[in-house]
Image: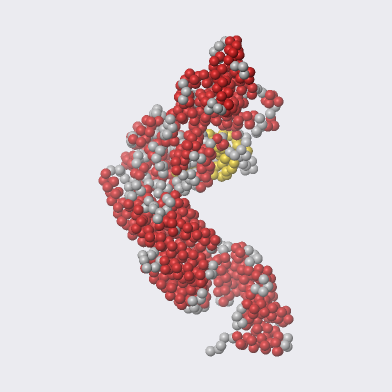
Amino acid sequence: MSADQAALDALFSLTYEELHRLAQRVRRGEPGVSLSPTTLVNEAWLKLSATPAAANTSPLHFKRIAARAMRQVLVEAARRRQATKRGGRDAVHITLDQQAAPADASDNVIALHDALDRLALLAPRQAQLVESRYFGGLEVREAAELLGISESTALRDWRLARAWLARELQAAR
Amino acid sequence: MSEDPVATYWAQVQALFEAVMDLPPDDQLRELHERTVDTVLREEVIALLHADRGSAGLIDLPLEQVAARLIDDADGYRGRLVGPYRLQSLLGEGGMGVVYRAERDDVARPVAVKILRDAALSPARRARFLAERHTLAQLMHPAVAQLYDAGTLEDGTPWFAMEHVAGVPLDVYCTQHPLDLDARLALMERVCDAVQHAHEHAIVHRDLKPSNVLVTVTGEVKLLDFGIAKQLDAVSEEQGPARDAVTRSQLRLMTPAYAAPEQVRGETIGVYTDVYALGVMLYQLTAGRLPFDLSRSTPGEALTEIVEREPERVSAVAQRNTAAWVADVRRGQWDDLDLLCRTAMHKDAARRYRTVDALRRDLQHLRRGEPLEAHPDSLSYRAARFLRRRRQLVTLLGVVVLSLGAIGVASVRQITRARDAARAELHRRNELQQFLLALFSGNEHGAPPDSLRVLTVVERGERQAAMLERDPSVQGDLLVALARIQRALGRYDRADSLAQAGIVSLGRASDTLGIATALMTQADIRLEQALYPSADSLLDAALHMLPRNTTTSTNRSWLQGDRAAEVADAEARLQDLRGRRQVLQGHYDSARTTLDIARTRAQGRDADPMLVADILGDLADVAFYKGEHERADSLNRDVLARVQQHAGRFHPRVASTMVNIGATAFERGRYDEAERWFRDALAIAEQYFGTSHVQVASTRTMLGRALVYQNRLEEATEALQQALVVQEASVGRNHPSVASILNELGNVALRRGQLDSADNYFGRMAEVYSASNGDAHFTVAVALSNRGTVAMERKDLPAAERWFREVVQRFAAAQGAMHLNTGIARIKLGRALIRQRRWREGIAESEAGYEVVKAGAAPGVSFLQAARRDLAIAFDSLGQRETASRYRREAEQHDPPKP
C-alpha cells in the first residue's frame, strides 16, 4: 500500500466510523441530529479536522472521501439487508409474499451504486459529481470547485447524469 | 481524450442533450432530426430526454430517508452462530464493530462477541480490529476483560469473544453510589492496576475514560475497549511515510475531554498519555465534572484549552459540590489530591508520573494519609531534582560494576554505551535516562540496587526497553545486553526472543556491527540449547555482516573511537563460537585450530578480557575431552584468575570455571580436591542465582559424585537429594537430568545397603526415562538393569533373572544384539542363572555375552572378569575342569598386579 493509499484508507475508515456513530444517534432519536449527508459530512469534518490524521487534508478533499464513505456505508448496509431478506439466516421462513414484494430501498441503492459504476466508465466527471452531491451532500458550488468546472457546467452535467441514471434504474427494475 | 471513442460518443450525446433539453418535447424531436442522422445516437438522446422529464427514483429522494431505512440494522447479526456462539442481543456498537451478548450452544455462559462491521471495506479498519484482538490476547488480568476465542466468518469477517462484563460505567457507578473519597480512590487504584498490566506488555490504551471502565455489582473493575491501543514495540513492515501515516491515523476520534496535549497535537504518545487520561478520570470522579468543559468548543478551541489552559483546582470544584462525602475530606487530603491530579495531568509529559504504578502508589499514599511521592513543581524542586539526577548518573557506573556488571563485561559495555548516549544527549533522551535509572536503581527513590535480585532488575529492564522504540540503536543494544543476562541465567527461550528483538531494533537503526554482535549472541544461546544448525546459520549471517561494517557510518559518533577494537572483538568472538560449536560436536582438533585463531585475534591489544577468558575456557574444554588433564587444568586456572580479576570473585563465570577445575580433578581421581572446588562453586552460584537454579543443581550433583567416590555416602545422599529437588523444580519431573540424579542416588543407596530405597530410586529412574526418552529407549533398560542388580543383592535370584531377561531384550531391540550393553546384560543374566545352579542355561548366556563384550572392550574390563569367574564355577560344577581352568587362568592374567 502506498503512502497516499494508506492515508486515504485511514481517513476513509475514520469517516466511515463517524457516519455510523452519527447514524446511531439519529436512531436513538437525539434531537438536532439528522442523517442528511450535508449535516453528517459537516459534523464528521468538524470532529476530524481536530485530529492529526486530517492535518494534510482540505475540507473539500475530505468531503469527497466522505461521500465515497457514505456510499459504501449505504451499499454495505443494503447488501446486508438483502442477504438477510433473501434467506441468509431465515431462509426457511420466507413466504411467497415476501419474495414477490416490490424492490425496496436496499435494491435501489445497490442498483444506483452499480449504475454509478457504469456511468464512471462512460463519463467519469458526471459520476464523480453525482457521488459528491448525492452521497456527500456537496453544494453545486463545492462540487464544481472540486471537479474544476464552472457551476453552470456542473448543473448541466447533473441534469444529464440524473437522466442517464433514471433510465438505467428503470431498465433495472 | 478526444480519440477515445467512448468519450467522443458521450460528448456527442451531451451536446445534443443540452442543445434540446429546454425545448418543448415536440421541438426536441424535430431539432434532433435536424442535428443528426445517426439513429442510434438519436434514440439514446430521446431516451435520456424522456427520463429527464420523469422521476429519477432514488436520486430524487433526500438521502437521509434512504439512510435512515438502511443503517438501522446493527442488530442484523442477532440469532446468528459465530464460531460456537449464538448471538443473543446487541450490547453496543461503535464505529469499529458491533458487540453482542452471546452464549455457546453447549455451555450456557454469556460472552461478549465483537464483530468487525463491513470487514472488506478497508484494510486499515481490519488491521485495527486484528490489533485489538492481538492486544487482548496478551493481557491476562482480573481487571481486564479477557479474550476467550477468536475466528473469522465465512465471508472473511473477523470476530472475537471476550469476557462478558455486566456492569455500569465508572462515572455512572460513582454517581449512583454514595462513595466516600477513599472508595473513589480505591476504584481508581484498581483501574491503575489494569492499565499498569497493559503497560507491562508494552501496550498503551490511549482511550481511557470512565465509559471504558465497567464496575460490576460486586464492585469489581473491568477495563474494556483496546480498540485503539498501541503496541509500543510493534515493528511495522511498512517504512517511511506510509507507516507514519498509519501510525498517526490510528488515533481514532478520541474523546477530546480525556485526550492529552501530545495526543491532540499529534505527537508521540506513550505511557504518559495514559497517565494523563487517568488524571482526568480521577479529577472527574472527585470534582464531579470534567477539568475542561469542551461541550461547546469548536475543535480549535478545544485544542487550545487542552494544550494551554490549567484546569481549576479539583479541590475547589469538589468543595462547591454538595455531595455528602466532600464534608469528610481533610484539608491536607485536598492539597494532596490537587497535587496528584496536577502531576498526572501535567501539560509536559516528562513531568507527569513516570509510570502508572507511581500514580497508583500516590493514590495509596493519599488513602493512608502518607506523604505523596509527587513533589510540588516549584523552582527549588526542579533544581533539587536536577541535582539528584546528576548524582544518580555518577553512581550509575558503580552500580553497573556492582550488580549487573558481574554478568559480563560485554553486557556492561553495551549498557555503558547506552548510558554514554544518554549522557551525551541528555535532553533529547530523557526517556532513556529514566529507563536506566529505573533499571539500575530499585525504584525512583533509591533503594539499594544490590539488594535486588538480578531477575527483578532484568524483568524491569525488559519492560522499559520496550518503551525505547524511538531510539532503535540504544534499544537494540539494551535488548541484546538483556539477552546475554537471561542466557547467563539459563532462561534460553527468553534470551532468544530478546536477542531477536534486539536484531530487529538494530536493523531499524541500520547498525551492522550491532546486528552482527546480536546474531552472535543468539548463536551462543542456540549453542547452549544444542541447536547446532541454526547456530551455524546465525554465525554465517554474523560473518556476512562483519567485514562490511568498518566503513558504515552510524549515527553514534561517540562510538567511533572504539570501533576498530569492537570489530576485532567481534571477529574473535565469532571464531570462539565456531570453536565451541566444534567442541560440542566432538571435533576437538579442528576446534583447537579455530580457537587458536580466535586467541590470536584477541591478543596484543585492548581486547575484552572476558572474551579472552571465554576462548581460553573453550581451549581448556578441548584439552579436557582429549584427556589432557594437566593442560586443561592449567588453562582453567588461568581463566579463573582472569575472570576473578575482571568480573569479581562472586561471578557465575567464576563458579562455572571452578566446576571445570573440579571436574578435571575428579577425572584424575583427586576426589577431595574436586569436592573443594565444587563446594566453592556452589557457594557462589547459590549466592548469585538463589538455591533453586539449574546450575546450582548440576553443581550439587557433581559434588554428590565426588562424595560417593570418597565413600562419604551419607553426605553424598544429602547433596544428591537437594540437587534432585531443585532439578525437578526447574526442569520438571520427567527430564533426563532428573533421571541421572536418581541413578546416582540409587547407586549410593545400593552401596549403603539400603536396597528398598535403591530399588525405589531405580524404579523412578525407569519411569522418568520412559516418559522423557520413550519406553523403547536404552536408558530405560539401564534403569531396569539396576533393579536387577538390587534383586541380586537381595539374593532374590528369580526376580533378578526376570529383570535381566527383560533388559537383554530391551537392549537388543534398542541397540542391537551385538551392542556392548546387550553383551553386559547377558553376562548379568548368566550370573543370575548360574547362582540358581542352572549351569547350562547360565553358561549359554554368559558365554554369548562374553563374546560380545570381548569384541568391543578391553580384555581386562570388570564385566569380562566377572564372566570368566562365573563360567569357571559353572564348568567346574558340570565337571568340565579344563574349560573351567582356562577361564580361571584368563581371569588371573587380567587381574591387577598385587602390591
Q: Is residue B450 left or right of residue B146?
A: left
Q: Is residue A88 left or right of residue B462?
A: right
Q: Position of residue B709 (x, y in %)?
A: 52, 77
Question: Can I make out residue B408 in this image?
Answer: no
Q: Is residue A33 above or below residue B816?
A: above
Q: Report which quarter residue B447 is drawn in.
A: bottom left
Coloration of the structure image: secondary structure
Q: Is residue B740 left or right of residue B197?
A: right
Q: Is residue B521 above or below residue A15?
A: below
**Residue closer to the observer: A55 or B118:** A55
**Residue closer to the observer: A119 or B747:** A119
Q: Position of residue B758 (x, y in %)?
A: 59, 72
Q: Report which quarter residue B512 is drawn in.
A: bottom left
Q: Tell me which residue sits at (35%, 48%) in the image.
A: B429
Question: Can I make out residue A143 in this image?
Answer: yes
Q: Position of residue B368 (x, y in %)?
A: 37, 46
Q: Tell me which residue sits at (67%, 74%) in the image.
A: B818
Q: Position of residue B462 (x, y in %)?
A: 44, 53
Q: Tell me which residue sits at (54%, 26%) in the image.
A: B2
Count up the numbered dots: 0
**Residue closer to the observer: B450 or B883:** B883
Q: Is residue A24 above or below residue B717?
A: above
Q: Tell me which residue sits at (71%, 25%) in the image.
A: A96
Q: Residue furthest left?
A: B380
